[in-house]
Amino acid sequence: MKKFGKILQYIFIIIMATITLFPFLYMILSSLMSFQEVISIPPTLIPEKLQFINYRDALKVAPFARYFVNTLIVTITNTLGTLITTTLAAFAFTFLDFKYKNTLEGFLLSLLMIPFEIVIFTNFRTIARLKLLDSYLALIIPFLASVYYIFYLKQFLTSIPKDFYNAAKVDGASDFEFITRVMIPMSKTNLFTIGLLNFITGWNSFLWPILVTNTKNMRLISNGLSAFATEAGSMIHLQMAASTITIVPILILYLIFRKRILEGVSYGGLKG
């Protein structure tokens, strides 16, 4: 009976995995089909001849190279900024004692209850008044810190005895030395997870970039893909090729570092 139950579990997992992966696999296969194969009824699942030329044509129709550069600049900068602010803030909340610490912590926690869509127009007006629209600064400044990641890292740091910090101070180490020599090495898995998840989120960001950018030269990859879907019209095979260009780098990144992500996320879940 137990064996039969395990078989059913495996069958269920295989079915769900197939349902989940099929859209991605079909997107990649469609990107290598001709236009006639993409629109054929019944649909063609395997291309008769791989049309790698679709990728070249897609890159000609829209400046995806520029979109890639913009996205890399913004995402890497935001990720580094988030890691720095997260590390410093989590350190302060965990190891330092200062006036109104609990009040500030409670205020920041309350911000997690506010959806991003509610404050997005306030942020937009601020950026507009600073005359930063259609610039890298408009895409970067609002995302240099994350309350969620601050408390995610703080949750881990509470497992580190404060005696480590006190011993470092007795030995004459500064706060910066404690952070770089003790805290960061001990929390590198969590920091790696924060950086990777933040990078993926930044790569896929859509709403904010479309609000603060007006020209093609400042578009990010997701906005460029959306505009391309309109510009390409009925050329579905090119749209699929463009979608693959956009998604494959993140999929590769996830497949390479999936174990590190799962380790960090599962630890955070256990601590919570």
Image: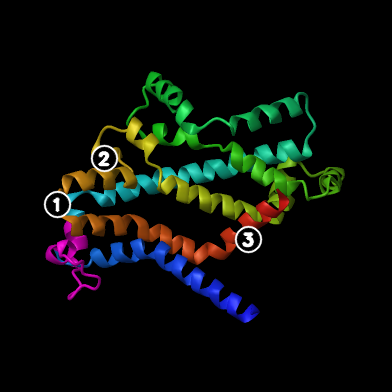
Left or right: residue 221 versus residue 63 is right
Residue at image position (19%, 44%) is 230
Q: CA distance from mark 2 to mark 1?
A: 24 Å
**Residue span colored magenta:** 35-57
**Dot 2 alpha-carbon crowd within 10 angstroms: few under 14, some 14 to 19, many 20 or more:** some
Q: Nearer the viewer, residue 119 or 8?
A: 8
**Dot 1 alpha-carbon crowd within 10 angstroms: few under 14, some 14 to 19, many 20 or more:** few
Comparing labels 1 and 3, the label whose residue is closer to the camera:
1
Amino acid type at circle 1 is Ser
Residue 217: numbered disc: 2
Residue 54: quadrant of the picture: bottom left
Indicate whether residue 43 is drawn in magenta: yes
Q: Nearer the viewer, residue 7 or 85?
A: 7
- The relative height of residue 51 versus residue 162 in the rendered view (above or below) is below
Residue 136 appearing in the image: no
| Label 1 element class | loop
Residue 236 horizontal/vertical position (percent): 19, 56
Amino acid type at circle 2 is Asn
Residue at image position (15%, 48%) is 233
Residue 131 appearing in the image: yes
Which is nearer the N-term, disc 2 or disc 3? Answer: 2
Left or right: residue 90 versus residue 137 is right
Residue 100 horizontal/vertical position (percent): 75, 24
Q: Which residue is mark 3?
A: 263
- The relative height of residue 268 versus residue 40 in the rendered view (above or below) is above
Left or right: residue 163 versus residue 145 is right
Residue 250 horizontal/vertical position (percent): 42, 57
Residue 147: quadrant of the picture: top right
Residue at image position (66%, 37%) is 89
